Amino acid sequence: MKYLFIAILTCFAVVSKSQIYKSEKFNKFIDCFRSSFKEIPKELFYEICDEEENDRLVGVDAVKILNDESNITVLVDLVYPEGGYTSMVMIYTFSNSGELLERTALGNNMLDLSGGDQCEFEMKSKNLLEVVQKNIVYEGVDYEIERVADSTYKYYFIDENGFDVILSRITQKRKYILPSLKVFNSKELYQYEESELDIMRNEIFADHGYIFKSKKWSDYFSKIAWYQPRFDDVSDKLTEIEKINIKRILEVSKRK
């Protein structure tokens, strides 16, 4: 019995020591995001992010902590040596103890003198991450003119649990579908007439099956083939993208 007790204590001590070691390593990893020197040692990255060693990887940059309320979600940029600037932007979520919970690639950068792919990201609200993958073309004698040939938008909902990609299920026959697909800024919205902004905003509610109380919009959407009124309240059905756009459309409309 005595030897069994000693064995249990020894096992517990080994586990505790291992947990302390892992915790210290994870703290060093997180400290990289809070320091002015943003580079993460590759050995630390491989260990914490559970990634296989890659001889092509030349650097790992700690970009940003997106959420640290319960679990911790971070952005990391993996830099590769191909011509020009090449990198892959990754998102990781860890438990507070350092356990890797989920990860995914957000986009990539592959730029040279003539242009290429560029990944841009921005927190549009506390919980909404916008990722824009652009195809850039540099023109002019000294390649000083930048032109965006194409852009694709993707959005992620960020909270204490981690991240989820936002999939917008919208009616393609809507007059204005973009307010459910991308976050507009005020400058973009000012290009529309007030009447257009009204339709744009109310289409969002209509697409979720909102039963309009006003005669104006009830009559307007009753003539639209895709409109199916089902709910008195659709607040819980709006995506973060739509919530932001509704607020901005109202703000711009008031200034018209």
Image: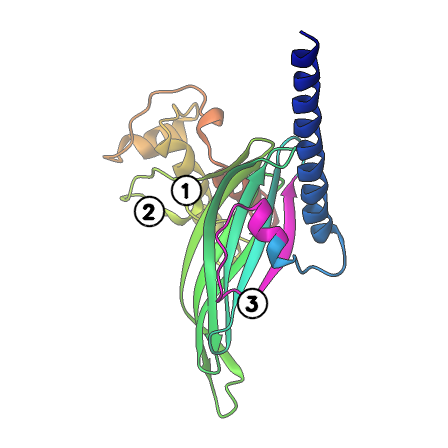
Q: Secondary structure at mark 1?
A: helix
What range is drawn magenta here? 44-67
Q: Position of residue 142 (x, y in %)?
A: 52, 90
Give the side of residue 108 with respect to residue 76, left or right.
left
48 relative position to 209: left or right: right
Q: Please state which of the two labelled residues, at mark 1 or mark 3, is closer to the viewer.
A: 3
Disc number for residue 58: 3
Q: Quadrant of residue 1?
A: top right
Residue at position x 56%, y 67% from top? 58
Q: Nearer the viewer, residue 2 or 126?
A: 2
Which residue is disc 1 drawn over?
A: 199
- Residue type at tag 2: Lys
Front label number (3 vs 2): 3
Question: Residue 164 or 244: which is nearer the viewer?
Answer: 164
Vertical placement of 233 versus 117: above or below? above
Q: Compare residues 130 and 162 and report the one nearer the observer.
A: 162
Task: Tell me the residue at 33%/39% (across/down).
Answer: 170
Amino acid type shown at disc 3: Val
Residue 65 lies in the magenta-colored region: yes
Judge whether residue 221 can be spotted in this image. Answer: yes
The numbered mark at residue 50 is none
Count neighbours of disc 2 (C-alpha within 10 A) and say few if under 14, some if 14 to 19, many if 20 or more: few
Q: Relative to 225, is 188 above or below?
A: below
Per the image, the residue denoted by label 2 is 175
Q: Position of residue 105 (x, y in %)?
A: 46, 51
The kind of residue on which mark 1 rests is: Ile
In the image: residue 63, left or right of residue 228: right
What is the C-alpha distance between the residues marked 3 and 2? 47 Å
**Residue for point 50% across, 50% down:** 51
Mark 3 vs 2, N-terminal side = 3
Give the Cα distance between marks 1 and 2: 8 Å
Q: Are marks 3 and 2 in contact (CB under 8 Å)?
A: no
